[in-house]
Image: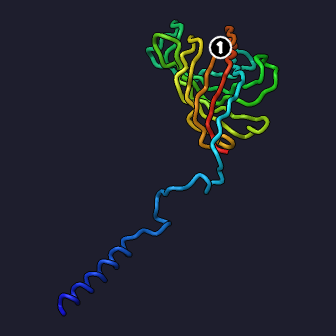
């Protein structure tokens, strides 16, 4: 009889401990969700093609060097290691600066190599036209400017490009002292 009472007491205490130890839903930091619970249906691969206009001087400059400099910065260096630029560059359908604008490249880039012209690109492509209006893609990667074709990762997106991932290929179309035109082909997986 004592064994039975002890066993029943053990079960009662065990269940009280288990129930008391459970967290309420409001205390859970994270949980798994299905894609459909967010209203997303299927994954799609999109290809975007546009031209990026980086104007570094003049009254209509779209890229401005941040006035921060280390004491050892060599201003006579052709690559100016450590320079930081903030950009608000137009994205157009054609290489002509006056062609239809489809968005802006907004963010920054930093000259990160002492021996070659290599940039760390931290950009959002913010689209303003068509079905992509209000959507963004985020680029974070290395851009070795003097290479014929550069590839940078797409690390995220918003709007139509929610859960975006993929890559952007950049190819210099033309460059002058003050204006670089870069052709972009972007391949991105996203949910719709």
State left or right for residue 53 relative to residue 130.
left
Provide residue 175's location: percent of width, then percent of height. 67, 10
- In-front residue for pair 1/101: 1
Extreme residue in the left direction: 2
State left or right for residue 55 relative to residue 68.
right
Q: What residue is drawn where x is 69% and y is 34%?
A: 126
Q: What residue is drawn where x is 54% and y is 7%?
A: 78
Q: What residue is drawn where x is 70% and y is 13%?
A: 179
Q: Is residue 37 depicted above or below 11 in this figure? A: above
Provide residue 79's location: percent of width, then percent of height. 53, 11
Disc tally is 1
Quarter placement of the N terminus? bottom left
Q: What residue is drawn where x is 64% and y is 27%?
A: 186
| Colour scheme | rainbow
Provide residue 133's location: percent of width, then percent of height. 75, 38
- In-front residue for pair 34/49: 34
- Classify 10 Å Cα crowding around label 1: few (below 14), some (14-19), many (20 and above): some
Provide residue 132's location: percent of width, then percent of height. 73, 37
- In-front residue for pair 32/82: 32
Residue 44 falls in which quadrant of the image? top right
Quarter placement of the C terminus? top right
Instruction: Kindly identify which residue carries mark 1.
Output: 172
Residue 105 falls in which quadrant of the image? top right
As helix, strand or loop, the secondary structure at mark 1 comes to strand
């Amino acid at each position: 009889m004592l064994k039975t009472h002890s066993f029943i007491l053990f079960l009662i205490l065990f269940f009280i401990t288990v129930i008391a130890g459970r967290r309420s839903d409001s205390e859970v930091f994270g949980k798994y969700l299905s894609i459909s619970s967010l209203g997303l249906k299927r994954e799609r691969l999109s290809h975007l093609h546009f031209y990026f206009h980086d104007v570094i001087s003049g009254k209509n400059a779209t890229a401005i060097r941040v006035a921060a400099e280390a004491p050892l910065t060599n201003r006579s260096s052709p690559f100016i290691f450590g320079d930081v630029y903030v950009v608000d560059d137009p994205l157009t359908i054609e290489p002509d600066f006056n062609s239809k604008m489809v968005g802006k490249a907004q963010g920054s880039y930093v000259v990160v190599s002492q021996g070659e012209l290599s940039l760390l690109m931290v950009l959002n492509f913010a689209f303003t036209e068509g079905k992509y209006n209000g959507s963004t893609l985020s680029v974070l990667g290395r851009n070795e400017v003097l290479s014929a074709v550069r590839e940078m990762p797409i690390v995220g997106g918003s709007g139509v490009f929610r859960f975006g991932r993929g890559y952007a290929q950049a190819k210099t179309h033309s460059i002058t002292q003050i204006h670089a035109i870069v052709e972009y082909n972007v391949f991105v997986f996203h949910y719709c």
